[in-house]
Amino acid sequence: ELCNSQTLWLLPGGTPTPLGSSSPVKVECLEAELVVTVSRDLFGTGKLVQPGDLTLGSEGCQPRVSVDTDVVRFNAQLHE
């Protein structure tokens, strides 16, 4: 399996370590796309970031967000 949805944090020296569910950014690798989910409480301060302030790669990858949620999602095709 090339991809999985486990969130990893790269420690000094390059050792990947799984993070708990409190990670503000999660990446899910699907067959044809990546789904990046970002908590709007990105820094854990209670102050929510605005979806328009977040970017992923080129300007063509716009966030997908609904007003009743505390997360912002990006969908990026693997070939993009």
Image (cartoon, helix red, strand yellow):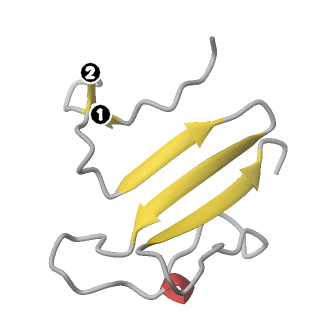
Q: Position of residue 58 (x, y in %)?
A: 71, 68
The N terminus sits in image quarter = top right
Location of residue 75 (image quadrant): bottom right
At x 42% / y 30%, what residue is drawn? 6
Q: Estimate the x, y position of residue 27 in percent, counting from the top left.
A: 51, 44
Above or below 32: residue 36? below
Which element type, helix, strand or loop, lies under badge 1? strand
Q: Amino acid type of disc 1? A: Leu
Residue type at mark 2 is Thr
Question: Is the residue 4 above or below the residue 10 in the image?
Answer: above
Q: Is residue 58 left or right of residue 22?
A: right
Residue picked out by circle 1? 10
Mark 1 crowd level (few <14, some 14–19, many ≥20, 10 Å Cα):
few
Say which residue appears at 23% left-offset and 50% top-offset.
22
Where is residue 3? Give x, y as percent.
60, 23
Q: Residue at x 66, y 45 (%)?
A: 34
Taking 24 as reference, is 8 above or below it? above
The disc placed on residue 67 is none
**Residue 18, picture quadrant:** top left
CB under 8 Å between callouts 1 and 2? Answer: yes
Residue pointed to by mark 2? 15
**Which secondary structure lies at badge 2?**
loop
Q: Is residue 60 above or below residue 33?
A: below
Residue 35: horizontal and vertical position, in percent? 62, 50
Q: Is residue 50 left or right of residue 16?
A: right
Q: Earlier in the sequence, mark 1 or mark 2?
A: 1
